[in-house]
């Protein structure tokens, strides 16, 4: 099977139209008929600014990254990218 693997990285508290962005991405893909997608929350990481973000037991509010992935065919990938 040939296809595409789309991967998006978003901050867990970023919102689009009042909904967490990772949830919005998954919902849009579902409405488009894409058969599956997943969101994974990071435990730790750093970005372009080099600031290390970690999930710690005593920190209640962080802004870690959520990875949102889809395995789909080329037409579905184009449609999802056009939407975004």
Image (cartoon, helix red, strand yellow):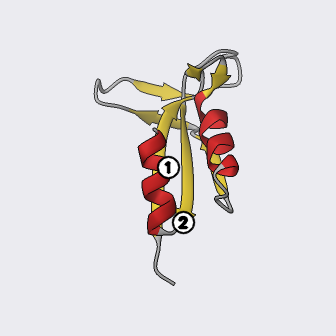
Quadrant of res 24: top right
- Return the residue nearer the eye: 71 or 66: 71
Please, what secondary structure does the residue beneath circle 2 have? strand
Against 41, residue 70 (above or below) is below
Q: In the drawing, does residue 16 fall left or right of residue 46?
A: right
- Vertical relation: 77 (above or below) 58: below
Q: Position of residue 32 (x, y in %)?
A: 63, 51
* Residue 37, placed above or below residue 84: below
- Residue at 67% over, 57% down: 33
Q: Name the mark nearer the viewer: 1 or 2.
A: 1
Camera-side residue of 2 and 31: 31
Q: Foreground residue, 55 or 5?
A: 5
Q: Residue at x 59, y 19 (%)?
A: 62
**Disc assigned to residue 80:** 1
14 with respect to 6 (left or right): right
Q: How far from the left and from the top, in percent, is residue 48?
A: 28, 30
Disc 2 target residue: 72
Q: Indicate the secondary structure of the residue bearing disc 1.
A: helix
Identify which residue, 16 or 52, lies in the foreground: 16
Q: Do the numbered discs 1 and 2 sit on residues whose CB atoms are within 8 Å?
A: yes
View extreme (bottom): residue: 1
Count of residue discs: 2
Task: Characterize the local packing of mark 2: few (<14), some (14-19) or many (20 or more) Cα atoms within 10 angstroms.
Answer: some
Query: x and y percent of residue 61 in the render?
Result: 65, 15
Name the residue rendered at 63%, 46% in the picture.
Answer: 39
């Amino acid at each position: 099977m040939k296809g595409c693997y789309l991967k998006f990285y978003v901050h867990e508290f970023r919102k689009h139209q009042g909904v967490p962005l990772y949830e919005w991405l998954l919902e849009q893909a579902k409405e488009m008929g894409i058969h599956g997608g997943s969101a994974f929350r990071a435990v730790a990481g750093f970005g372009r600014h080099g600031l290390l973000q970690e999930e710690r037991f005593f920190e209640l509010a962080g802004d870690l990254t959520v990875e949102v992935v889809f395995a789909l065919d080329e037409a579905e990938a184009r449609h999802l990218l056009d939407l975004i």
